[in-house]
Amino acid sequence: MPKSVIVLIGAFAVGIVLALSSLQLDFPTGWIGGLALIGWTLFARQRWAKLEETTGLEPGAPERTIRIYAVGTALLFGHSITAITYPDIDLHVGSGNYLAIDSWTMIAAMLVASLVVRRGDKIRDERDDAIIARGTNAGFLALIAILILFSFVLGFLPPRFGASITLFMVGNILIAIIVVSLLIKYTVQLIEYGKDTIANFAIGADE
């Protein structure tokens, strides 16, 4: 479980570095993040195969997909939150920077990575349903809370600051809010899966 959180923090940091590098070098870096995500996925798949042969505590099909989406979402969040901190930069495609293209490149890589770990079995039991539901509830509550907070910020923002905020920037902030709510959802699900794995390991050790 701590390793999963560390991986998410690392992916978030990589997203920040990629966005800053793209801005400084005027060079698309999304493909680097995409290849890194797919490379990590291949490494994780080998590790899960070893766990299946040794302990039998390898992640099931739903958990594997959640792990990939969690890392990819953390990568995107780090990238998008960095882009938002530069309000003077136009994030439209073809506006002189590669931030938007990089985001779409990493989204495509995340979809490819999810296909890499997809297994023939898509069995979801009651445990999976309960864990997925808890994560979804946490993400939904986080989304509502952040949107309410953002609404208050917009409503009470001094005019001299509000004049510099464009509708396009508000749209990008809303997208970032959705991304962070998804990240919270996946993080809660990973934590719940981690707790369940630890419990199963303890039961196996007792037996």
Image (cartoon, rainbow, N blue to C red):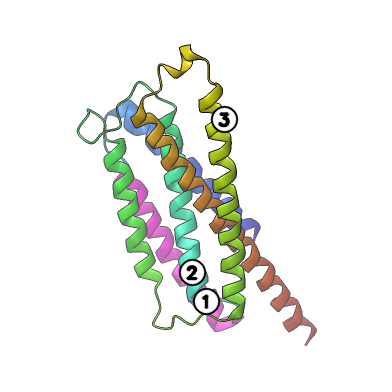
**SS label for mark 2:** helix
Q: Which residue is mark 1?
A: 60
**Mark whose residue sits in front, 1 or 3:** 3
| Closer to viewer: mark 3 or mark 2 | 3
- Residue pictured at 60% horizontal, 51% vertical: 141
Task: Name which quarter of the figure residue 192 lies in.
Answer: bottom right
- Which residue is drawn at the image coordinates 62% and 77% (left, top)? 127
Q: Compared with residue 104, is residue 44 higher up or lower down, i.e. above or below?
A: below
- On residue 172, the disc is none
Q: Is residue 87 above or below residue 133?
A: above
- SS majority, magenta: helix
- Separation (CA) of disc 1 from disc 3: 41 Å
Which quadrant, please, contains the N terminus?
bottom right
Q: At numbered mark 3, what does the secondary structure look like: helix, strand or loop?
A: helix
Q: Position of residue 38 (x, y in %)?
A: 37, 59
Question: Which amino acid, by three-letter code, is at mark 2?
Answer: Arg
Q: Position of residue 20 (x, y in %)?
A: 39, 31
Mark 1 surroundings: few (<14), some (14-19) or many (≥20) residues within 10 A: some
**Depth check, front residue: 182 or 107:** 182
Q: Position of residue 189 (x, y in %)?
A: 59, 63
CB atoms of marks 3 and 2 within 8 Å: no
Residue at which label 2 appears? 64
Inspect the image, locate mark 3, and give the three-letter code of the amino acid beneath it.
Answer: Phe
Residue at point 44%, 35% (across, down): 173
Looking at the rendered structure, the kind of residue marked 1 is: Gly
Give the mark nearest the N terminus, 3 or 2.
Answer: 2
Q: Residues within 10 Å of mark 3 (few under 14, many from 20)?
A: few
Q: Position of residue 137 (x, y in %)?
A: 59, 59
Of all residues, the one furthest to the bottom in this rendering is: 207
Magenta span covers which residues?
Answer: 30-56
Q: CA distance from mark 2 to mark 1?
A: 6 Å
Question: Which of the labelled discs sits on residue 152, or is there none?
Answer: 3
